[in-house]
Image (cartoon, rainbow, N blue to C red):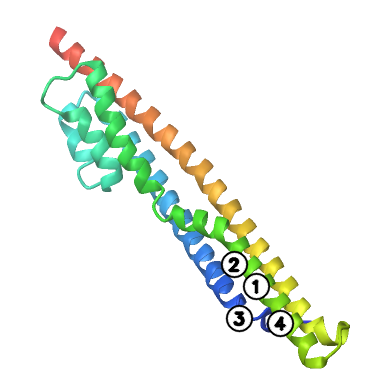
Amino acid sequence: MNFIQTFNEGGLIMYPLALFSVLIVAVAIQKIIFLSKFATEYRKLHQNAMASVSANKLGELKWVFKNASKLISEPHDVLFDDYPLSKEELNDKISRRMSETTQGLKSNLWILGTIGSSAPFVGLFGTVLGIMHSFKAIGEAGKSGLAAVGPAISEALIATAAGIIVAVVAVMFYNYFQVKINGINLEFRNKLEDLSELIKIAKTYRKQA
């Protein structure tokens, strides 16, 4: 039994499940590329920023992040605020910007979560349709038996299995990206706070000099 034959035997409910599958692949590819580019960009910019601080070229720091993506530049802009902030105020401001960055990193992730929670119910709806078709077949044939209800039962089972498989794949990707984003977010914040401390030390050293 080939895939196309199995798909057709699953009934109409297989089409929304096929659409779900396409969305899962599209979102997964988009997130992998997006998160990889984000991590590469902020790590490179952090290295450049650290080099500027080490060389005592604090005036160049703003330019390091000037052309960076918004999710990277806005949290770092807090470090260059001309208005003097206490440590608590600075941390609060960083946290607010970081929450925006986190939301940006999680964009489109809701699609995987929605598919993961709804696909089993779509498959279950296919199960109900298959059972209804089996009763209809019994009524039309005037008797029960595998020959009468076999195709309808097959439709129900295929739809159920397809719904479960789609849901499992969506949840696996969803959990993977959640862990990945949390890791990137933690590393990003740690590097941001490290840079903040070094800038503070460099400014203090300048005043003393």
Three-letter amino acid code of the residue under disc 4 = His
- Residue at figure coordinates x 16%, y 14% from the top left: 206
Q: Which residue is mark 4?
A: 133
Q: Residues within 10 Å of mark 2 (few under 14, many from 20)?
A: many
Q: Earlier in the sequence, mark 3 or mark 4?
A: 3
**Image spot of residue 149 (x, y percent):** 81, 82
Q: In this orientation, which residue lies closer to the viewer: 64 or 75?
A: 75
Q: Earlier in the sequence, mark 1 or mark 3?
A: 3
Q: Residues within 10 Å of mark 4 (few under 14, many from 20)?
A: some
* For residue 44, above or below residue 6: above
Query: Of discs 3 and 4, which sits in the foreground?
Result: 4
Q: Quadrant of residue 138?
A: bottom right
SS of the residue at dot 2? helix
Q: Which residue is mark 3?
A: 12
Residue 62: mark in rendering? none
How far is the residue under mark 1 from the one under mark 4?
Answer: 10 Å
Q: In this orientation, which residue lies closer to the viewer: 137 or 181?
A: 137
Q: Which residue is mark 2?
A: 122
How far is the residue under mark 2 from the one under mark 1?
Answer: 6 Å
* For residue 10, above or below residue 48: below
Residue 126: mark in rendering? 1
- Residue at figure coordinates x 15%, y 7% from the top left: 208
SS of the residue at dot 3? loop
Three-letter amino acid code of the residue under disc 1 = Gly
How far is the residue under mark 2 from the one under mark 4?
Answer: 17 Å
Q: Earlier in the sequence, mark 1 or mark 4?
A: 1
In-image side of 11 versus 86 (left or right):
right
